[in-house]
Amino acid sequence: MKNYYEVLGLSATATDHEIKHVFRRLAITYHPDKNPTPEAEAFFKEVNEAYEILGDPTKRIFYDQLLSGEIAVVPDEPLQAWHKDPVYRKRRQAGYKPPPRGPSPRIVMMESFLKYVQILSWVACGWSSLLIVDYLSPSKINEEKVVTNVGAAKRAMLHSSGDLLLTEHGRHYPIAIHEIRYFPHESELKIFSSPLFSLLIKIENHDSSYQLNNLATIYRNFMFAPILLILLSVVGLIWKKGIEFRFNLGLVTFLVFLLNIGFFFMSKI
């Protein structure tokens, strides 16, 4: 005897509300208008058959008794009467046992989160768009004087680089030993920042003849993060197939989004 609870991906203790909710979701997902494949059409029929029994309190009580073995199965007549598909009745009489179907609990769980994945994709896309506008807008330029810190310079001599570039306002930036000559003591340097979020974009010396390259900012060394985020969010918005793929894509998008937020605050001036 077919287990209609397995068809719907539910336990035998499922409430009427749960049965109705799962039936509606599966009926929409596997309806021939939404999914024209033969497999989907066959499963759509099974879903309707399952709900015809489990959605009726009287039939469900009798079915549960049959399923648990509390009452004997009358040679197929009661169950056959519930099936209006003559092809199905013929296959049952021939001893045909259909393979188990229906989405696994894991897939059902993933599908329930897809609406949040869609919301996350919109939020990530909007965030990335704001960063693009912020980066492409005319930069703010602050000019500050370079202050030489002898102690920091001595410590950095043991390595190839360090936070040797210090300004009169206490800002410090990593710079290689060979780059110090471009930023002499008491000279002016230009700090370029974004207009919307005040994120560091670049640093140049007084005559713009040299530009620092090793800047840990979302608009320089970590620019890959917003680029990757907007690609993932666009794919999440336009890709409509594959429950598992879309769920995993949402997880990756969420992690990259968190990475962007971290880089964002690291880049604040």
Image (cartoon, grey):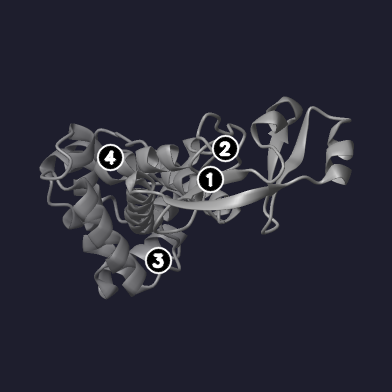
Where does residue 204 sit, x and y in percent of width and height? 54, 38
* Above or below 174: residue 265: below
Seen at 26% across and 58% down, the residue is 25
How far is the residue under mark 3 from the one under mark 4?
A: 44 Å
Q: Which residue carries the number 4 mark?
A: 239
Q: Circle 2: is it few (<14), some (14-19), or many (20+) Cα within 10 Å? A: some
**Which quarter shows the C terminus?**
bottom right
Labels 1 and 2 touching (C-beta < 8 A):
yes
Tally of numbered discs: 4
Q: Nearer the viewer, mark 1 or mark 4?
A: 1
Q: Can residue 175 be seen?
A: yes
Marked residue nearer the N-terminal end (1 or 2): 1
Q: Which residue carries the number 3 mark?
A: 65
How far is the residue under mark 4 from the one under mark 2?
A: 47 Å
Q: Can residue 3 be seen?
A: no
Question: For this rendering, which residue is in front, 58 or 205?
Answer: 205
Where does residue 201 sit, x and y in percent of width and height? 49, 44
Where does residue 100 sit, x and y in percent of width and height? 38, 40
Q: Which residue carries the number 1 mark?
A: 190
Identify residue type, mark 4: Trp
How far is the residue under mark 2 from the one under mark 3?
A: 85 Å
Labels 3 and 4 touching (C-beta < 8 A):
no
How far is the residue under mark 1 from the one under mark 2?
A: 6 Å
Q: Secondary structure at mark 3?
A: helix
* Above or below 156: residue 77: below
Task: Give the number of the disc on residue 205.
Answer: 2
Labels 1 and 4 touching (C-beta < 8 A):
no
